[in-house]
Amino acid sequence: MNLKSRNWIVRGGVAVGIVLAGFAAWHFSDRGALPEGIVAGNGRIEAIETDVAAKAPGRLLELLVDEGQTVAAGQLIARIDAANLQAQKSEAEARLQQALNAISTAEAQVAQRQSERAAAFAVVRQREAELNAARKRFVRSETLAQEGATSVQERDDDRARVEGVAAAVEAARAQLAAVEAAIGAARSQVIGARSNVDAARATIARLDVEIRDSNLVAPRAGRVQYRIAQPGEVIGAGGRVVNLVSLTDVDMIFFLPEALAGRVALGSEVRVVLDAAPDDVIPAKVTFVADVAQFTPKSVETESEREKLMFRVKARIDPAFLARHPRQVKSGLPGMAYVRLDPKTPWPDNLATLTTR
């Protein structure tokens, strides 16, 4: 081999070496040979989805939001026709007034019966006094008749008078008992009327809740993902109207092999880098590590990793970051999650600076 050929071989080797060195530098600096204490797993962003549904059946009158619109917690989203509920409420209010009138009537009857009892009691006292006087008169008549100072007829008349007044006393006592029974019945009517008032008020309160529930509001801040129903449609109980995706409860779901998952503690710091935004570093914290392993999901692509059991890990994206980027929240975006197992381990340069824009 001549000198010229040797020079070309040397130059070619140097060029290949430079290319390999450049590739290695790119591989370890960009994708990263991660330092000890930091592990990575790939996964997807998942935002909590909420269905806003009708509690009671009815016709959808208005749908006040569009797909993609951001809504605040408690914001009115849709209205269900509540005319039937309003009619039921009017009927319940009429029953309430009727029950209140019944209370007044029953209480008036109680007062009347109490007056009658006082009069009946006075009659009983009067009849008892008459009976006492008749008995004394009869005793005197019987004594005089025995002495021959008065006639037997007068004595018999006094005995008959005693028996008659005694019967009048019993009649007066029976009348008093009847009046007291009437008072008890009138008081029962008062109790029944008050129960009807309570029932009517409970019905009105329930209808107020149902009428209020006919105005569908957002249970949390979020973005409208789907309009499931349209105005004019009849919605059944539990029928979905709008699907919301949360703007504050967003997680990165990723998987780690069993050798690494056991070292991840709840609250561990996480950096998320999405495929759609490789230059953005998103802060998160571990909130869940599965207790049971599962086979590697489809999102892990290498054959060697498919042979391992993986643990599902959930990292909650920092709510403050989400509040600054509400329009960028999208469920299903793939990316990488980097977990710092040791708080003392510094982040690599490409993960150290969080996205602030």
Image (cartoon, rainbow, N blue to C red):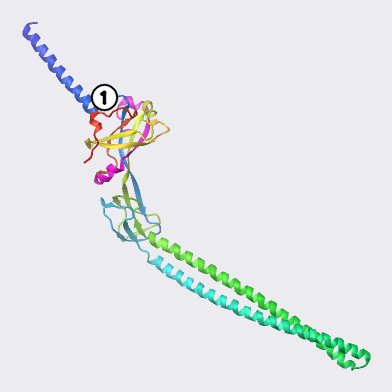
Q: Is residue 120 above or below residue 40?
A: below
Place residue 352 in its image quadrant. top left
Q: Is residue 296 visible?
A: no
Place residue 155 in its image quadrant. bottom right
Quadrant position of the C terminus in the picture: top left
Q: Locate residue 238, reporting x and y percent.
A: 39, 54
The residue drawn where x is 85% and y is 87% is 138
Residue 77 versus residue 72: which sits nearer the camera? 72
Q: Mark 1 points at which residue?
A: 33
Residue 12 versus residue 222: which sits nearer the camera? 222
45 part of magenta stretch: no
Q: Is residue 152 left or right of residue 59?
A: right
The residue drawn where x is 81% and y is 88% is 161
Q: Locate residue 18, reporting x and y percent.
A: 14, 19
What segment carries the magenta color? 298-327
Residue 216 versus residue 168: which sits nearer the camera? 168
Q: In this view, does 60 lie above or below 295?
A: below
Residue type at mark 1 is Ala
The residue drawn where x is 8% and y is 9% is 5
Q: Can residue 326 be seen in this view?
A: yes
Quadrant position of the N terminus in the picture: top left
Element at label 1: loop
302 part of magenta stretch: yes
